Image (cartoon, rainbow, N blue to C red):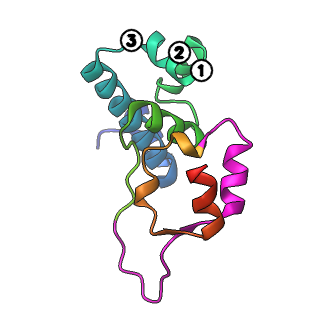
Amino acid sequence: MKEPNVYDRIRARTKPETKRYVQKNAELASRVAQLLKARGWTQKEFARALGKSESEVSKWLSGLHNLTLKSIAKMEAVLEADLLVAPDLDIVDSKPFSITSEMIYLWENSDFNLASSQNISSFESFDDEAAQTIAA
């Protein structure tokens, strides 16, 4: 019987969540590259639009960087495209997601600005104070 090579032994010992992480990170980096190509943008132009250094964006797009959801949302806003898509779920007794004024306060006081998001319409509802804040 032939002994497995090093690659096969490593793959066999790799945790399922690690495999998923690597796959999803590579898919996200590939999607960003496709969107940049479609827009005719260089990585340098993308970095400038994000307000980040070119080296930081290069690290993000290497497929090995552990991106935060905040970084992904910022890229989505700049690219005006979804990078992460959650599947539709039929969950019994689920309530629609609602943006609250507290959430808006947190977003406004961080480096991500909710008002720049193109996906506000995807939320089911806003509380009255949140709607007034966005309208202002």
The reply, left or right, for residue 130 in relation to residue 25 is right
In the image, which is nearer the foreground, mark 3 or mark 2?
Answer: 2
Percent of width and height locating residue 112: 62, 39
Could you tell me which secondary element the residue under label 3 belongs to?
loop
Could you tell me which secondary element the residue under label 1 belongs to?
loop
Q: Which mark is residue 48?
A: 2
- Magenta stretch, residue numbers: 88-113
Confirm whether residue 68 shows in the render. Answer: no
Confirm whether residue 42 shows in the render. Answer: yes
The reply, left or right, for residue 44 in relation to residue 134 is left
Crowd rating for badge 2 (residues with CA inside 10 Å; few <14, some 14–19, many 20+): few
Q: Which residue is mark 3?
A: 42
Residue visible at 46% across and 53% down?
120
- Cα separation, mark 1 vs mark 2, equals 5 Å
Against 131, is 58 above or below?
A: above
Residue visible at 39% across and 59% down?
86
Q: Which residue is mark 1?
A: 51
